[in-house]
Each structure stands twice: as structure tokens, then as C-alpha cells.
Image: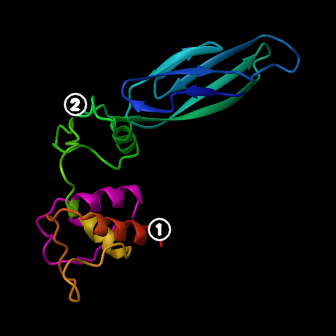
Amino acid sequence: ANAVGMPTLGWEPLTISVSAAGSADPGGGPLTWEWSSNGATASGFETDIVLSEIGVQEVLLTVTDVFGSTATDSVIVLVGRDFLDTTTSIFRLETAWMSALGITRGCNPPTNDRYCPHDTVTREQMAAFLARALDLPTTGTDHFIDDDSSIFEQDINRLAAAGITKGCNPPTNDRYCPHDTVTREQMAAFLYRSNA
């Protein structure tokens, strides 16, 4: 079995064209092709399948010969939220990618149907993005004295525990300044420490 699908990144509902090109029976017999992913199904050598669940989706191809023997292959597809305020953005695909990977959930909880693409990013929001992107473990340590009312306190502490942030008031560094915006130089430091 050999599965091919395009596109592999988009927003829900995402229609992808799949093909079993390269799938053949060594004996030359007839085959059937079944495609499935989280309840979505399709049949055929080349067909379309609609994915409506947000996240990383595996589209499974099962090829069956006349004797009932099967072979499988799959295509990984990232399906992101189609935020109401990114439909004309040049970064629409990038926000779909962030959503599919769980890095962003939106900017207007609990609905979260908006991304707020023109807003600046606060230090607490950036902490959430990085903690989710890096899949940082939780910590029981409270690293800063000024983030207790932040909905992102756990993300901030995860970043501190990983050594990605040191605080905003050196040399004491007992504050995070969660509501301040992130400067480009601060983001450079966060990203550098993320990859150290």
C-alpha cells in the first residue's frame, strides 16, 4: 500500500485528495481501496475525503486483494481551526498550523473562533504558545510573584522550570511581567533558550 494526499495542511473542514498510486497486487489481481480518518471514510484508488476534526489526523489507506489480504499506509494531515478573523490574512495557513498542533486555541475564550491576528502578544500569551509547542511538563513550583492572577500561570512556570525564561526584573528575577508585550529581543532570547 502507498498513500498520497494533498493538501496536508489546512483548516476545517478540509477536503484532501488522496491516491493509492504505487499500490499494486504483485500477482496482478484486482484490489479495493478504503480510506478512513476519525469517522470520515471514502473508497477508491483516487478520491476525496473530508476531515472536520481539528488536530493532527492520520488518514489510513487499507488495500485489500481478492483473497482478503490487506496492506496499509497512511498520510498525516494537519487540520486547523478556520478562525473568523484570519480568512483574508496572508498568514491564514500558519494560524491553521498553530491551531492543528494545539499551540493556539484562539483569543476569545470560551468560543475561541477568533485569532486576533493584529493584536500584539503579551509575555503570558507567549508563555502559553511556547509551553504548548514544546510540550513542556507541568511543575509544582511557583517561580514568580506577579502571575498568580494569570490564566497562563502554569505555562509561565513551565517555561521557567525549563530555563526558557528567567524573569523580567534582573537581578532579582522574581517577576515575570505577564501583561507586558514581548519585544523582538525578548522573543529571540526565549527561542534561543528553547533550543539550547
- Snapshot quadrant of residue 47: top right
Q: Which residue is pictured at 23% across the width and 63% down the height?
A: 182
Q: Which secondary structure is most common in the magenta stretch?
A: loop
Judging depth in this view, the residue of 168 and 15 nearest the camera is 168
Asked if 100 appears above or below 128 in the picture, the reply is above
Residue count near mark 2 (Cα–Cα under 10 Å), binned few <14, some 14–19, many ≥20: few
Name the side, left or right, on which 169 lies relative to 64: left
Q: Mark 2 sits on what residue?
A: 84
The quarter of the rendered structure image containing the N terminus is: top right
**Residue at the far left in the pictured view:** 149
Tell me, yes or no, whether the highlighted magenta stretch contains residue 103: no
Name the side, left or right, on which 150 lies relative to 7: left
Picture disc at residue 195: 1
Name the side, left or right, on which 129 lies relative to 37: left
Q: Amino acid under label 2? A: Leu
Tell me, yes or no, whether the highlighted magenta stretch contains residue 152: yes
Element type at mark 1: loop
Measured in 3D between alpha carbons, the distance from the residue under mark 1 to the one under mark 2, in whole angstroms, is: 33 Å
Q: Amino acid under label 1? A: Asn
The residues colored magenta run 125-153
Q: Which residue is pictured at 32% across the width and 65% down the height?
A: 187
Name the side, left or right, on which 70 lies relative to 14: right
